[in-house]
Amino acid sequence: MDESANTPEHDPDDGVPRRAHPVLPLPQDPGRFVDGALGHEIEDDGPEPHLDPSIEAEVRALLAHAPAPGPMPDAVSERIERALLDAARLRVDPGPLLASGADTGTDGHPGGGAVLTLPSRAERPRPIYLVAAVAAAAAVVAVGASALHLTKRPNGAAVVGDRYSSAAGASTPASPPPTSEGLHIQLSTTAYARGSFAAQARTLLDHPGQPIRGLAAESPGIGPIATPIGLEACLEEIGAVDGTRPAPDHVSADVATFEGRPAVVVVVTRAGASTAWAVERSCTTSAPGLLQGATPVP
């Protein structure tokens, strides 16, 4: 029998015999703690991250319509890199160094053996879809903030049909407030074309689709024009509403396409006469993005 493992060895420095000890390998996954013999894993009993399927679907829809975010600012990139490095150091910690004067065994190793510091679930990197959900929520908040900024216009109008003032500041008679049915905004796949624009606008009035939902209306891919405040800012910019005429009786907006490009078709009805415009989805104050000028609707 080979007793080489039990043969005393002498340290050439002090001459004291010492017994050789076999070196046991640590587990390959340093994120696990092994109790006693290798193979007895202690599971983290924290709850697994979970995202409701309906919320995840809404997030995916928002991200699908989001424009290209552009290059990441250098400061943000550096902060992310530092955070990832810190997370990596927390995830694998070789344990505290042996302090001077600490109790050791006869073999020169700490009495407690090697120590692995385990990060809690809260310290572990989050799944990518949770990061995407946070990014989408931040984009929605940014769109809402830009819409609130539109309420600070000089004429003080808040919704389509409110009181308007002329640029010179002269007051005009108040128009009746619109009813809940006076504004209709929808999202469709209608492909509007220049040659049939008037007829398609009439179809929008006669056969409207389902109104767009609040969360989808604030999607970055659509823009603030799908909200009442954003739509009003666009109508003022293209001259569809102003302080010299009564408020519209009805306004319809269809988030669709015009001549193959993303657009919004707006139809304003006043005193029984309807007029249609086609604008870019980014239409707002000082940036009308007009694609089709005022067109009478038969």
Image (cartoon, rainbow, N blue to C red):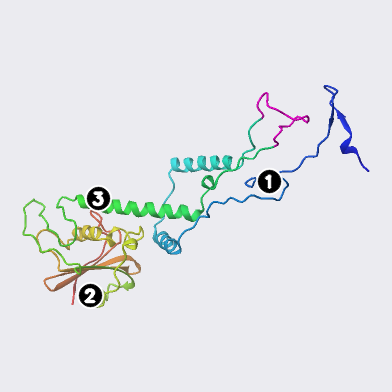
Please rate how many residues cluster around mark 2, counting C-alpha atoms within 10 Å: few if below 14, some from 14 to 19, many from 20.
some
* Disc 2/disc 1 C-alpha distance (Å): 72 Å
Secondary structure at badge 3 equals: helix
Q: Mark 1 points at which residue?
A: 35
291 relative to 13, above or below: below
Task: Locate the C terminus and report the quarter of the image it occupies.
Answer: bottom left
In this view, the mark in front (2 or 1): 1
In-front residue for pair 10/37: 37
Q: Mark 3 points at which residue?
A: 149
Task: State the image quarter where residue 231 is shown.
Answer: bottom left
* Disc 3/disc 1 C-alpha distance (Å): 59 Å
For the record, the magenta segment spans 98-113
Point 87% across, 30% down: residue: 9
In this view, the mark in front (3 or 1): 1
Please rate how many residues cluster around mark 1, counting C-alpha atoms within 10 Å: few if below 14, some from 14 to 19, many from 20.
few
Point 89% across, 34% down: residue: 7
Contact, mark 2 vs mark 1 (Cβ under 8 Å): no
Q: In this view, does 132 lie to the left or right of 212?
A: right
In-front residue for pair 215/237: 215
Task: Give whichever of discs 2 and 1 has the lower sequence position.
Answer: 1
* Disc 3/disc 2 C-alpha distance (Å): 30 Å
Residue 105: within the magenta?
Answer: yes
Find the residue positioned furthest to the right.
Answer: 1
Residue type, label 3:
His
Q: What predominant SS class does the magenta segment belong to?
A: loop
Contact, mark 3 vs mark 1 (Cβ under 8 Å): no
Q: What is the number of the mark on residue 205?
A: 2
Task: Give whichever of discs 3 and 1 has the lower sequence position.
Answer: 1
Task: State the image quarter where residue 104 is shown.
Answer: top right
Residue type, label 2:
Leu
